[in-house]
Amino acid sequence: MNLLQTISEIPICFGGAAISGEGGGYGFGEISDTSANALLMQAFDLGITIFDTAPIYGFGLSEKRLGMAFRRKREKVFIISKSGVTWHNNRRVNMTNDPVTTIKMLEQSLRDLQSDYIDLYMIHWPDNKIDIRRPMEALASAKSQGKIKHLGLCNTNLVDLDLAAQIDSIEVVQSEFNLFHRQSEDFLNYLSSHHIAFMSWGTFDKGIISGTVTNDRTYDRSDARGWAPWWDKKANRKKIATIEKIATLLNAHGHTLLELACGYNLTHPPLTHLLCGMRTPWQLNETIRAVKNPPPRSLIAQAKSIIDQAMAE
Protein backbone atom coordinates (compact mmCIF):
# COMPACT_ATOMS: atom_id res chain seq x y z
CA MET A 1 0.00 0.00 0.00
CA ASN A 2 1.47 3.36 -1.04
CA LEU A 3 1.27 6.67 0.80
CA LEU A 4 -1.84 7.92 -1.01
CA GLN A 5 -3.71 4.68 -0.36
CA THR A 6 -3.09 5.06 3.36
CA ILE A 7 -4.59 8.56 3.20
CA SER A 8 -7.72 8.00 1.12
CA GLU A 9 -9.75 4.97 0.09
CA ILE A 10 -11.46 7.06 -2.59
CA PRO A 11 -8.98 7.22 -5.51
CA ILE A 12 -9.77 10.87 -6.23
CA CYS A 13 -7.71 13.95 -5.47
CA PHE A 14 -9.52 17.28 -5.75
CA GLY A 15 -7.76 19.50 -8.31
CA GLY A 16 -7.40 23.01 -6.93
CA ALA A 17 -6.92 24.63 -10.34
CA ALA A 18 -10.68 24.28 -10.76
CA ILE A 19 -11.52 26.76 -8.00
CA SER A 20 -9.46 29.81 -8.90
CA GLY A 21 -9.94 30.77 -12.55
CA GLU A 22 -10.83 34.42 -11.93
CA GLY A 23 -7.51 34.90 -10.13
CA GLY A 24 -5.59 34.40 -13.37
CA GLY A 25 -2.71 32.07 -14.08
CA TYR A 26 -3.63 28.43 -14.62
CA GLY A 27 -7.37 28.02 -14.11
CA PHE A 28 -10.59 26.92 -15.72
CA GLY A 29 -13.19 29.62 -15.33
CA GLU A 30 -14.76 31.84 -12.71
CA ILE A 31 -16.15 30.47 -9.47
CA SER A 32 -17.07 32.59 -6.46
CA ASP A 33 -15.60 32.29 -2.97
CA THR A 34 -18.94 30.96 -1.76
CA SER A 35 -19.26 28.35 -4.52
CA ALA A 36 -15.63 27.26 -4.15
CA ASN A 37 -15.99 26.83 -0.40
CA ALA A 38 -19.26 24.91 -0.78
CA LEU A 39 -17.68 22.60 -3.36
CA LEU A 40 -14.68 21.89 -1.13
CA MET A 41 -16.94 21.14 1.82
CA GLN A 42 -19.09 18.85 -0.32
CA ALA A 43 -16.00 16.97 -1.51
CA PHE A 44 -14.85 16.53 2.07
CA ASP A 45 -18.29 15.36 3.21
CA LEU A 46 -18.30 12.79 0.39
CA GLY A 47 -15.02 11.34 1.60
CA ILE A 48 -12.38 13.12 -0.49
CA THR A 49 -9.47 14.03 1.76
CA ILE A 50 -6.64 14.77 -0.71
CA PHE A 51 -6.59 18.29 -2.14
CA ASP A 52 -4.03 19.45 -4.71
CA THR A 53 -3.01 23.02 -5.40
CA ALA A 54 -0.10 25.21 -6.50
CA PRO A 55 0.72 28.93 -6.31
CA ILE A 56 0.18 29.42 -10.05
CA TYR A 57 -3.45 28.32 -9.73
CA GLY A 58 -5.16 31.69 -9.61
CA PHE A 59 -1.88 33.39 -8.64
CA GLY A 60 -2.35 32.15 -5.08
CA LEU A 61 -6.15 32.21 -4.99
CA SER A 62 -6.51 28.41 -5.01
CA GLU A 63 -4.25 28.05 -1.97
CA LYS A 64 -6.04 30.85 -0.15
CA ARG A 65 -9.44 29.26 -0.75
CA LEU A 66 -8.20 25.87 0.43
CA GLY A 67 -6.67 27.49 3.50
CA MET A 68 -9.88 29.28 4.35
CA ALA A 69 -12.04 26.19 3.79
CA PHE A 70 -9.98 23.82 5.92
CA ARG A 71 -8.49 26.08 8.58
CA ARG A 72 -10.61 24.33 11.22
CA LYS A 73 -10.23 20.86 9.68
CA ARG A 74 -6.51 20.95 8.93
CA GLU A 75 -5.66 17.58 10.49
CA LYS A 76 -8.47 15.89 8.57
CA VAL A 77 -7.24 16.73 5.07
CA PHE A 78 -4.07 15.98 3.09
CA ILE A 79 -2.94 19.05 1.16
CA ILE A 80 -0.52 18.99 -1.77
CA SER A 81 1.26 22.07 -3.08
CA LYS A 82 4.24 22.76 -5.30
CA SER A 83 7.19 25.00 -6.07
CA GLY A 84 8.79 26.03 -9.32
CA VAL A 85 6.17 28.02 -11.25
CA THR A 86 6.26 31.60 -9.99
CA TRP A 87 5.70 35.00 -11.61
CA HIS A 88 7.00 38.54 -11.86
CA ASN A 89 5.18 41.68 -10.70
CA ASN A 90 3.56 41.97 -14.13
CA ARG A 91 2.38 38.35 -13.72
CA ARG A 92 4.64 37.03 -16.43
CA VAL A 93 5.24 33.41 -15.47
CA ASN A 94 8.73 32.32 -14.49
CA MET A 95 9.68 28.68 -14.08
CA THR A 96 12.68 27.99 -11.87
CA ASN A 97 13.87 25.46 -9.31
CA ASP A 98 16.36 27.85 -7.78
CA PRO A 99 16.50 26.80 -4.09
CA VAL A 100 16.06 30.36 -2.79
CA THR A 101 12.88 30.73 -4.85
CA THR A 102 11.78 27.26 -3.77
CA ILE A 103 11.85 28.20 -0.10
CA LYS A 104 10.20 31.58 -0.72
CA MET A 105 7.36 29.78 -2.48
CA LEU A 106 7.04 27.25 0.32
CA GLU A 107 6.82 29.97 2.96
CA GLN A 108 4.20 31.90 0.96
CA SER A 109 2.16 28.73 0.47
CA LEU A 110 2.20 28.07 4.20
CA ARG A 111 0.83 31.56 4.79
CA ASP A 112 -1.82 31.27 2.07
CA LEU A 113 -2.89 27.83 3.30
CA GLN A 114 -3.02 29.12 6.89
CA SER A 115 -1.00 26.09 7.97
CA ASP A 116 2.24 25.29 9.77
CA TYR A 117 2.94 22.43 7.38
CA ILE A 118 2.14 21.00 3.96
CA ASP A 119 1.42 17.29 3.77
CA LEU A 120 3.02 16.70 0.37
CA TYR A 121 5.25 19.27 -1.29
CA MET A 122 6.31 18.69 -4.89
CA ILE A 123 8.69 20.21 -7.39
CA HIS A 124 6.28 21.19 -10.17
CA TRP A 125 8.43 20.87 -13.31
CA PRO A 126 12.01 19.92 -14.21
CA ASP A 127 14.45 22.79 -14.71
CA ASN A 128 17.32 21.98 -17.07
CA LYS A 129 19.32 24.92 -15.70
CA ILE A 130 19.37 23.69 -12.10
CA ASP A 131 20.39 20.30 -10.70
CA ILE A 132 17.29 18.98 -8.95
CA ARG A 133 19.41 18.06 -5.93
CA ARG A 134 19.73 21.76 -5.06
CA PRO A 135 16.02 22.45 -4.44
CA MET A 136 15.74 18.98 -2.91
CA GLU A 137 18.38 19.89 -0.32
CA ALA A 138 16.40 23.01 0.59
CA LEU A 139 13.15 21.06 0.83
CA ALA A 140 14.75 18.26 2.84
CA SER A 141 15.85 20.89 5.34
CA ALA A 142 12.31 22.30 5.50
CA LYS A 143 11.03 18.76 5.99
CA SER A 144 13.37 18.25 8.94
CA GLN A 145 11.86 21.42 10.46
CA GLY A 146 8.35 19.98 10.17
CA LYS A 147 7.18 22.35 7.42
CA ILE A 148 6.76 19.46 4.98
CA LYS A 149 5.69 15.90 5.76
CA HIS A 150 6.36 14.19 2.42
CA LEU A 151 8.20 15.06 -0.81
CA GLY A 152 7.32 14.35 -4.43
CA LEU A 153 8.01 15.29 -8.04
CA CYS A 154 5.66 16.35 -10.83
CA ASN A 155 6.19 15.87 -14.58
CA THR A 156 9.49 14.22 -13.87
CA ASN A 157 11.84 11.74 -15.54
CA LEU A 158 13.96 8.78 -14.48
CA VAL A 159 17.18 10.81 -14.29
CA ASP A 160 15.72 13.39 -11.90
CA LEU A 161 14.05 10.68 -9.83
CA ASP A 162 17.41 9.03 -9.24
CA LEU A 163 19.12 12.34 -8.45
CA ALA A 164 16.37 13.53 -6.10
CA ALA A 165 16.45 10.23 -4.22
CA GLN A 166 20.08 10.91 -3.34
CA ILE A 167 18.83 13.72 -1.09
CA ASP A 168 15.54 12.44 0.34
CA SER A 169 12.87 9.88 -0.40
CA ILE A 170 10.39 10.65 -3.17
CA GLU A 171 7.05 9.23 -2.09
CA VAL A 172 4.68 10.48 -4.81
CA VAL A 173 4.95 11.31 -8.50
CA GLN A 174 2.31 13.29 -10.36
CA SER A 175 2.31 13.25 -14.17
CA GLU A 176 -0.09 13.55 -17.06
CA PHE A 177 -1.80 10.27 -17.82
CA ASN A 178 -4.96 9.54 -19.78
CA LEU A 179 -6.18 7.74 -22.89
CA PHE A 180 -4.39 10.23 -25.13
CA HIS A 181 -1.27 10.87 -23.02
CA ARG A 182 0.43 7.83 -21.52
CA GLN A 183 3.63 7.10 -19.64
CA SER A 184 6.18 4.50 -20.70
CA GLU A 185 6.32 1.04 -19.18
CA ASP A 186 9.86 1.81 -18.00
CA PHE A 187 8.55 4.81 -16.07
CA LEU A 188 5.68 2.89 -14.49
CA ASN A 189 7.94 -0.04 -13.63
CA TYR A 190 10.42 2.31 -11.96
CA LEU A 191 7.72 3.76 -9.74
CA SER A 192 6.47 0.28 -8.84
CA SER A 193 9.91 -1.08 -8.02
CA HIS A 194 10.70 1.95 -5.85
CA HIS A 195 7.29 1.88 -4.12
CA ILE A 196 6.46 5.41 -5.29
CA ALA A 197 2.79 6.38 -5.42
CA PHE A 198 1.57 7.65 -8.79
CA MET A 199 -1.21 10.20 -9.29
CA SER A 200 -2.46 11.23 -12.74
CA TRP A 201 -3.24 14.77 -13.76
CA GLY A 202 -5.10 15.52 -16.99
CA THR A 203 -7.32 12.55 -16.17
CA PHE A 204 -10.10 13.94 -18.40
CA ASP A 205 -7.69 15.75 -20.77
CA LYS A 206 -9.11 19.10 -19.67
CA GLY A 207 -12.64 18.07 -20.57
CA ILE A 208 -12.02 16.36 -23.90
CA ILE A 209 -12.35 12.79 -22.63
CA SER A 210 -15.32 13.63 -20.42
CA GLY A 211 -17.12 15.06 -23.45
CA THR A 212 -17.58 18.58 -22.10
CA VAL A 213 -15.29 20.13 -24.73
CA THR A 214 -16.80 20.68 -28.17
CA ASN A 215 -15.37 22.28 -31.29
CA ASP A 216 -17.56 25.37 -30.95
CA ARG A 217 -17.10 25.90 -27.21
CA THR A 218 -15.55 29.25 -26.31
CA TYR A 219 -13.66 30.33 -23.18
CA ASP A 220 -13.14 33.66 -21.45
CA ARG A 221 -9.89 34.96 -19.96
CA SER A 222 -10.51 33.21 -16.65
CA ASP A 223 -10.15 29.86 -18.43
CA ALA A 224 -6.64 29.01 -19.63
CA ARG A 225 -8.11 27.03 -22.51
CA GLY A 226 -9.04 30.37 -24.06
CA TRP A 227 -5.47 31.60 -24.43
CA ALA A 228 -2.81 29.04 -23.45
CA PRO A 229 -0.44 27.84 -26.22
CA TRP A 230 -0.80 24.23 -25.06
CA TRP A 231 -4.52 24.26 -25.99
CA ASP A 232 -4.17 23.02 -29.59
CA LYS A 233 -7.56 23.42 -31.27
CA LYS A 234 -6.45 21.59 -34.42
CA ALA A 235 -5.26 18.53 -32.51
CA ASN A 236 -8.33 18.71 -30.30
CA ARG A 237 -10.67 18.37 -33.27
CA LYS A 238 -9.37 14.87 -33.97
CA LYS A 239 -9.62 13.96 -30.30
CA ILE A 240 -13.18 15.27 -30.03
CA ALA A 241 -14.30 13.32 -33.11
CA THR A 242 -12.76 10.16 -31.66
CA ILE A 243 -14.39 10.65 -28.28
CA GLU A 244 -17.78 11.11 -29.94
CA LYS A 245 -17.39 7.65 -31.53
CA ILE A 246 -16.37 6.14 -28.22
CA ALA A 247 -19.33 7.74 -26.43
CA THR A 248 -21.68 5.87 -28.76
CA LEU A 249 -19.90 2.60 -27.99
CA LEU A 250 -20.05 3.20 -24.25
CA ASN A 251 -23.71 4.21 -24.30
CA ALA A 252 -24.57 0.92 -25.98
CA HIS A 253 -23.01 -0.88 -23.02
CA GLY A 254 -24.45 1.34 -20.30
CA HIS A 255 -21.25 3.23 -19.47
CA THR A 256 -20.12 6.85 -19.63
CA LEU A 257 -17.04 8.71 -20.76
CA LEU A 258 -16.23 9.61 -17.15
CA GLU A 259 -16.32 5.94 -16.22
CA LEU A 260 -13.99 5.14 -19.10
CA ALA A 261 -11.52 7.88 -18.19
CA CYS A 262 -11.32 6.79 -14.57
CA GLY A 263 -11.42 3.08 -15.32
CA TYR A 264 -8.64 3.27 -17.89
CA ASN A 265 -6.25 5.09 -15.58
CA LEU A 266 -6.90 2.83 -12.62
CA THR A 267 -5.97 -0.26 -14.65
CA HIS A 268 -2.38 0.99 -14.83
CA PRO A 269 -0.59 0.34 -11.54
CA PRO A 270 1.16 1.90 -9.74
CA LEU A 271 -1.37 4.63 -10.63
CA THR A 272 -3.83 4.59 -7.74
CA HIS A 273 -5.23 8.14 -7.56
CA LEU A 274 -6.78 10.49 -10.09
CA LEU A 275 -6.32 14.24 -9.92
CA CYS A 276 -9.67 15.61 -11.11
CA GLY A 277 -10.76 19.19 -11.63
CA MET A 278 -14.40 19.57 -10.61
CA ARG A 279 -16.18 22.93 -10.69
CA THR A 280 -19.78 22.01 -9.92
CA PRO A 281 -21.59 19.70 -7.49
CA TRP A 282 -22.81 17.67 -10.47
CA GLN A 283 -19.26 17.11 -11.74
CA LEU A 284 -18.15 16.11 -8.26
CA ASN A 285 -20.96 13.60 -7.78
CA GLU A 286 -20.54 12.13 -11.26
CA THR A 287 -16.78 11.68 -10.82
CA ILE A 288 -17.23 9.83 -7.54
CA ARG A 289 -19.90 7.68 -9.18
CA ALA A 290 -17.61 6.99 -12.14
CA VAL A 291 -14.75 5.50 -10.11
CA LYS A 292 -17.21 3.06 -8.58
CA ASN A 293 -18.52 1.80 -11.93
CA PRO A 294 -15.65 1.23 -14.38
CA PRO A 295 -16.33 -0.39 -17.75
CA PRO A 296 -15.11 -3.98 -18.16
CA ARG A 297 -11.52 -4.30 -19.32
CA SER A 298 -12.67 -5.61 -22.70
CA LEU A 299 -14.65 -2.41 -23.32
CA ILE A 300 -11.75 -0.25 -22.15
CA ALA A 301 -9.52 -2.13 -24.60
CA GLN A 302 -11.97 -1.44 -27.44
CA ALA A 303 -11.98 2.27 -26.65
CA LYS A 304 -8.20 2.36 -26.47
CA SER A 305 -7.97 0.61 -29.84
CA ILE A 306 -10.26 3.21 -31.43
CA ILE A 307 -8.08 6.02 -30.04
CA ASP A 308 -4.82 4.39 -31.12
CA GLN A 309 -6.12 3.93 -34.66
CA ALA A 310 -7.47 7.48 -34.90
CA MET A 311 -4.30 9.08 -33.57
CA ALA A 312 -2.15 7.07 -35.98
CA GLU A 313 -4.00 8.40 -39.02
Image (cartoon, rainbow, N blue to C red):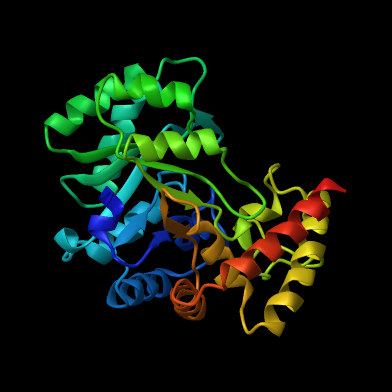
The answer to which quarter of the image holds residue 86 is top left
Q: Is residue 280 left or right of residue 38?
A: right
Furthest-right residue in view? 313
Residue in the image at 24% along x and 44% along y: 110
Residue in the image at 81% along x and 53% along y: 309
**Residue 105 visible in the picture:** yes
Q: Is residue 80 above or below residue 163?
A: below
Q: Is residue 171 left or right of residue 88?
A: left
Residue 56 image position (x, y, % from top left): 46, 44
Q: Is residue 290 above or below residue 101?
A: below
Residue in the image at 48% along x and 55% along y: 17
Q: Is residue 189 left or right of residue 147?
A: right
Residue in the image at 45% along x and 57% along y: 275
The answer to which quarter of the image holds residue 77 is bottom left
In front of the other: 60 or 237: 237
Residue 202 image position (x, y, % from top left): 56, 53
**Residue 153 visible in the picture:** no
Residue 225 image position (x, y, % from top left): 67, 54
In front of the other: 224 or 59: 224
Q: Is residue 262 above or below residue 253?
A: above
Q: How many marks?
A: 0
Residue 38 image position (x, y, % from top left): 36, 76
Furthest-left residue in view? 145
